[in-house]
Each structure stands twice: as C-alpha cells, then as structure tokens.
Image: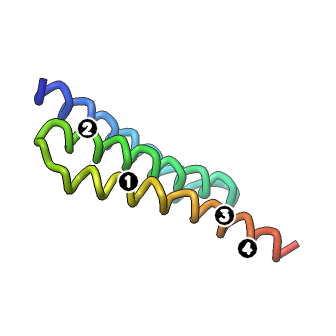
Amino acid sequence: MTIYLVSVATLLVVILLVGLARLIRGPSNADRMLAAQLFGTVGVGVLLLLAEAYSQAALLDAALTLALLAPMTLLAFIRLSGARQ
C-alpha cells in the first residue's frame, strides 16, 4: 500500500510541474492565480498521502495548515485586483 500511495504522490508532483509551467507562462494574472491555487490543493493532497504512507502525524498538521492558508492567497489576489480597477 505504501508504494501505491507514494506513486500517487509522485504523480501529483508531476501535475505540480505542469502547473509551474502555467504559472510562469500564464497569459493573465488569473491564470497564474489558478496555478497557485493548484499548488495549494495538490500540496495538501501530497502531504496527506505521504502522512498516510509513512504514518507521520506532523504531515497531517502541515496539510491542515496549508489547507487553511491556500484560500488566503485567493482572497488577497481578489482584493488586490479589485483595487487596481
């Protein structure tokens, strides 16, 4: 089971690399923001998978913290983009 969970976590990291390409190239700021949200969502998934695979409670805490902080970036983006208009 551990090999399966680590394999899925590796696949999610590959998805993050694709998101990194969108973050760098993204034609608009909204595309870049969605890529950043992808980082938060996939990061939580990777941390949860690794926490289960290696029985590390600290990774669960890190995933919870990331899950709580990731929406804050979206709120900051909305607030800043509204201020520009």
Residue that badge 2 annotates: 49
**Marker disc for residue 30:** none
Disc 4 residue type? Leu
Question: Where in the figure is residue 51, as x and y percent of width and height?
Answer: 20, 44
Q: CA distance from mark 2 to mark 4?
A: 34 Å
Q: Is residue 10 or residue 64 the one in the foreground?
A: 64
Disc 2 residue type? Leu
Q: Nearer the viewer, mark 3 or mark 1?
A: 1
Residue that sits furthest to the right in the current view: 85
At mark 4, the secondary structure is helix
Q: Is residue 84 above or below residue 73?
A: below
Tags 2 and 1 touching, CB below 8 Å: no
Question: Where in the figure is residue 80, as x and y percent of width and height?
Answer: 73, 73
**Marker disc for residue 80:** 4
Tags 4 and 3 touching, CB below 8 Å: no
Residue that badge 3 annotates: 75
N-terminal of the pair, mark 2 or mark 4, is: 2
Residue that badge 1 annotates: 64
Tags 2 and 3 touching, CB below 8 Å: no
